[in-house]
Amino acid sequence: MRVSVTCVIFDIGGVLEITPETGWVRRWEERLGLPDGGVNERMRDVWAAGGIGAVGERDVHREVASRLGLDGPHVEAFMADLWTEYLGTPNDELIDHVRGLRGKCGLGILSNSFVGARERETELYRFDELVDRIVYSHEIGIEKPDPRAFEAACAALDARPESCLFIDDVAVNVEAARAAGMQAHLFEDNPRTFARIAAHLDAGPLARGSVPLG
C-alpha cells in the first residue's frame, strides 16, 4: 500500500532544462533542399517511435541516413544538432533549489523523452543524483498526457497521486496530471514555482511529521 509521502515531480525540457528552438531543423532542410517541415514529415514516425522506445539509437541513425540521404558523418552531425537542442542548458537556479529539497520530500522526474536521453542527461546534468526516481517515456513506452505515465511516476516513488505535485511547462500535461489525481503546477518561471513547491510541502504530510524519502 502506498504511503502518503509528499513528493515533487518535475518535467525536464522547458523546466529543469532551458530548451529554446535553435533552428537546426530548418538549416538541414535548406541544406537538403527540402520544404519547411520536410524533415519532420519524413521522420515523424521515427520520432514517435523513439519517444516510446520502440526503436533504438542505431535504428534512428539508419532511418535518418535512408530517409534524408545522409552518409555516416552527416548523420552524426544531424544527430548532434538534434541533441544540442534537446538537451538545452541547465536551469541552474531550479536545479539548485531541487537539490535543497533532498530529505524534505520525495523527488522525481517524469519526462517525455527520446531514446538515448538518459545516458546524455546523466552525463551532462546528473539528474540521477538530483532526484530519487526518473521515469522516461522511452523506457516505459508511454508518453504524457496518457494517465498511465502519471501513474508510473507515482508508483516509482511509492506515493499516492494526491501527495504528489507535478511541474510541467505544457498545459495539457498539467491538466492531465490533475485528472490523474495529482497536484499540478504550470511552470512559467522559477519564483512562482518555488512558491508553489513551498505551499505543497507546507500542506503535505511531511509538514505533520511523516518520515521523508531519501
Image (cartoon, rainbow, N blue to C red):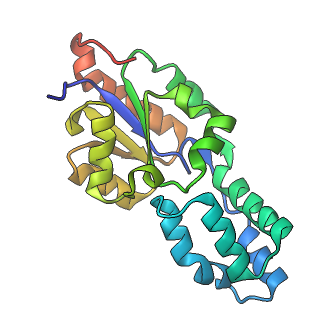
Residue 108 in the figure: left or right of residue 201: right
| Residue 35 position within the rendered picture, expressed as x and y whole percent measured from the top left | 71, 89
Q: Is residue 180 above or below residue 1?
A: below
| Residue 43 position within the rendered picture, expressed as x and y whole percent measured from the top left | 60, 77
Q: Residue at x 57, y 59 (%)?
A: 56
Q: Residue 76 appears in which quarter of the rendering?
A: bottom right
Q: Is residue 133 above or below residue 188?
A: above
Q: Considering the image in quadrants, where does the N terminus appear?
A: top left
Q: Residue at x 47, y 28 (%)?
A: 131
Q: Is residue 66 above or below residue 7?
A: below
| Residue 164 position within the rendered picture, expressed as x and y whole percent measured from the top left | 29, 35
Q: Residue at x 69, y 37 (%)?
A: 124
Residue 26 in the figure: left or right of residue 212: right
Q: Considering the image in quadrants, where does the C terminus appear?
A: top left
Q: Residue 210 appears in which quarter of the rendering?
A: top left
User: Toward the viewer: 47 or 177?
Assistant: 47
Q: Residue 213 appears in which quarter of the rendering?
A: top left
